[in-house]
Amino acid sequence: MRLLLLAAVLGIALAARVSYDGHKVLRVNPTDDQLALLMQFKNRPGFSFRNEPRRTGANLDIMVSPEQHAAFLSFLKEKNIGFHVLFDNIQTLIEAEDRRQRSMSKVPRAISFDQYYRYDEINSYLEELAAKYPNLVTLESIGKSYEGRDMVVIKISSGGSGTRPAILIDGGIHAREWIAPATALYVIYQLVESNAANSALTDAVDWYILPVLNPDGYEYSHTADRMWRKTVSVTPISGCPGVDGNRNFGFHWNEVGASDYPCYEDYAGEVAFSEIEARNLRDFALANKEQIKLYLTFHSYGGYLLYPWGYTSELPPDWHTLQELAADASLAHVNAGGDPFIIGSSTNALYAAAGGSDDYMKGVAGIELSYTAELTNTYYGFQLPAELINETVTRFFESVRVFGRYVKENF
Ligand code: ARG
Ligand code: ZN
């Protein structure tokens, strides 16, 4: 009883937590032929492809359970596939994250970018901003998640009564990609709390930011399974909940790079927009589509700036504009001390996958400038240590600045 109480106080569900003890992460640099061989492991029990490059020469990080490890190593040797071990035991990273989280003072203090916040903490911060900056900030719940959590969009507008061009940003459609909500939060922090320094970004452009697009999954990744990616809705297979939110949007839905099988990580859902979270974002974007000129969705990891399409290798007619703007954003990231982003269409630079929010925003909502940012390229992947949040978000804010300036100058 006392232990349970302690667990509740610490905000961790000790008993229910999935352990990744002994799970290794191997990094391979496969040739095209080797990649084809490796793909057979993609959805096998005991394997998780943390990223999956189609681009020759790109890293592929594969998490392997202790049960599968020996056989997989023999396979790699037999096929002559070179690899190195990124993490010998991924559970040690998870536990290090927990320790840091617990050591963080729970005494209310100013927001900082050296820790990951929970859903409630993020929303409390947004409420604080709305109270403190009523002339700049309004909050809107665009609907509730599957488990009933509000999906809160913060609107940052210094005037213009909704006539100004706007930028829509979201983060956290994939639960385990914690740096995504953190980055969205940092953009909010800069635009609102450092408005004097950043007034050029808000004097002619409105910002709509949804830091946690998949709040149920996000919480689940904190309390139950650090590697959770999907939503948490019930599926036709009991024991396999959740849909990949970024395969669920209704534009060339489920045509490629998605799965019909509920137990897989890239399950597209039974129908397009089966997920309430995807519907809520869709409805918000459609209601404001005249105003929204640019869409940015935050993911991790890999260090990519991707534009449509994810459903086809064909390029949109304005791909040149998309490419050049991304190149400017990447340059700003480099000037801030970051690495250059790999830039291209989702299909060509990463892999084909239909049903993404980025494709929908461009293809259906008519938001021509639509990007997925795969934040951070460190080998930590999803478990980017909290100590590295600050440099990651401050550098990327310089890219956001470029997007903001472009919208201001071109619409
Ligand atoms: N890693 C992201 C995902 O798998 C990339 C999405 C890129 N966009 C796309 N429409 N495929 O969801
Ligand atoms: Zn993602």
Image (cartoon, rainbow, N blue to C red):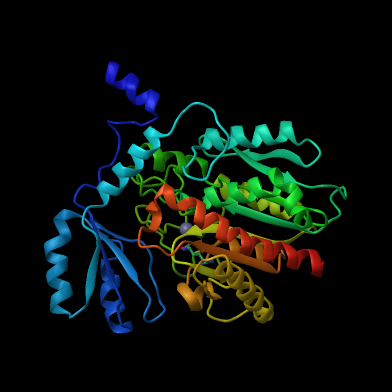
Residue at 72 percent of width and 35 percent of height: 130
User: Which residue shows up at 44% across the image and 68% down it?
Assistant: 257
In front: 310, or 262?
A: 310
Image point (59%, 35%), residue name: 123
**Which residue, as the protein is rendered here, is positioned at the far top?**
1
Position above or below: 182 against 409? above
Does the image show residue 274? no
Left or right: 90, with 74 as reference point: right
Residue 96, image quadrant:
top left
Q: How many tags in the picture?
A: 0
Displayed quadrant of residue 408: bottom right
Residue 311, percent from left and from top: 53, 72
**Which residue is nearer to you in this view: 7 or 150?**
7
Residue 205 percent location from the top left of the image: 79, 56
- Quadrant where the C terminus sits is bottom right
Q: Quadrant where the N terminus lies?
A: top left
Q: Nearer the viewer, residue 28 or 47?
A: 28
Instruction: Give left or right: position of 354 versus 405.
Output: left
Q: Vertical placement of 389 versus 27: above or below?
A: above
Q: Position of residue 340 (x, y in %)?
A: 52, 73
Left or right: 66, with 224 as reference point: left
Measured as percent of width and height from the top left, residue 199 is found at 77, 53
Task: Give residue 43's quadrant in the image.
Answer: bottom left
Q: Does residue 374 appear in the picture of this structure?
A: yes
